[in-house]
Amino acid sequence: MTKTLHVISSMATRHVLNELAELFQRQHSCRLDIESVGGVVAAQRVQAGDAFDVAVLAADAIEALAQAGKVRAATCLDVACAEVAVAVRRGAPRPDIGSEAALKHAVEAASSIGYSTGPSGTHLQSLFERWGMAEAIAGRTILAPPGTPVGALVAEGRAELGFQQLSEMIHLQGIEVLGPLPPGVHIVTVFSAALTAGAVDTQLSKMWLAFLVSPEADEVKRRNGMTPAQ
């Protein structure tokens, strides 16, 4: 009988994990069942004890789950990094985001701003507050529902300016990625993996974790808008 490993992840690592899973399955004659959902929802499901062997989430979420005893702290490891990028609808004007001042002006001028409920959204809220514009733009901000890419809101014209991890944007149609946030406000999210407290096949799970940080996985991460964790 083919062994099956159950994995839950946030949407940011979906493309990376799916591509790596194909390689891992061929090498180990097993099956990986990967469910990618909004990071907040994924963490809630691990917290609730849903039946998964491995969780791949933002590092702070994995750390919180380890402290709660929901993932095995001894197995936690950083897998990849993703920088937050800015996108507009394909064919729309491309505002300058090359400096903090330029980005601030672009946000001030945008009729609508989309961001996510995940770590990138938390950082952006802090940035808007630091700029002293959080209240002024509150009526123009759109929070993407968990599991919904911000780029989809941009492609549909619901958000003029969209912010999210590059890995969640580069595969979407109908948008143009302007680039990462400029120096001074650059945001990078680290994603980590760990065995859950209820992991069934711990040996295969540990092999999967080792594969996630192997040199073989590095190019897959780069191709999907991420970089290997240091």
Image: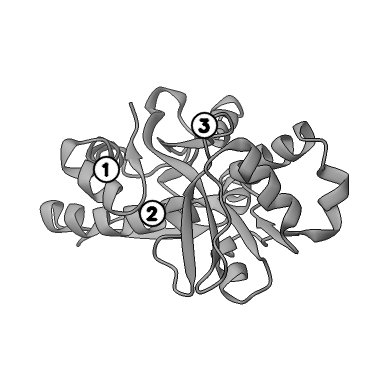
Please rate how many residues cluster around mark 2, counting C-alpha atoms within 10 Å: few if below 14, some from 14 to 19, many from 20. some
Distance from disc 2 to disc 3, alpha carbons, whole Å, reads: 38 Å
The disc, 3 or 1, on the residue closer to the chain's N-terminal end is 3
Cα–Cα span, label 2 and label 1: 11 Å
Q: Position of residue 111 (x, y in %)?
A: 75, 64
Disc sitting over residue 38 in the figure: none
- Tell me which amino acid carries mark 1: Trp
Looking at the picture, the colour scheme in use is: one colour
Circle 3/circle 1 CB separation < 8 Å: no
Tell me which amino acid carries mark 3: Pro
The N terminus appears in which quarter of the rendering?
Answer: bottom left
Q: Nearer the viewer, mark 3 or mark 1?
A: 3
Q: Give the number of the disc on residue 183.
A: 3
Horizontal and vertical percent position of residue 124: 67, 42
* Image height of 174 relative to 26, above or below: below
Picture quarter with the C terminus:
top left
Tell me whether circle 2 and circle 1 mark residues in contact (CB < 8 Å). Answer: no
Report the side of 38 relative to 131 (left or right): left
Front residue of this view, candidates 128 and 66? 128
Kindly identify which residue carries mark 1.
208
Q: Amino acid at mark 2?
A: His
Judge whether 88 appears above or below 121 on screen.
below
Disc 2 and disc 3 in contact, CB within 8 angstroms? no
Callout 1 environment at 10 Å: few (<14), some (14 to 19), or many (20+)? many
Left or right of 62 in this view: 34: left
Residue 8 visible in this rendered orientation of the protein: no
The residue carrying pointer 3 sits among few (fewer than 14), some (14 to 19) or many (20 or more) residues within 10 Å by Cα, namely few
- Secondary structure beneath label 1: helix
Q: x and y percent of residue 60 in the render?
A: 56, 31
Occupied quadrant, residue 216: top left
Residue drawn at the location 24% of the way across and 50% of the way down = 220
- The residue labelled by disc 2 is 6
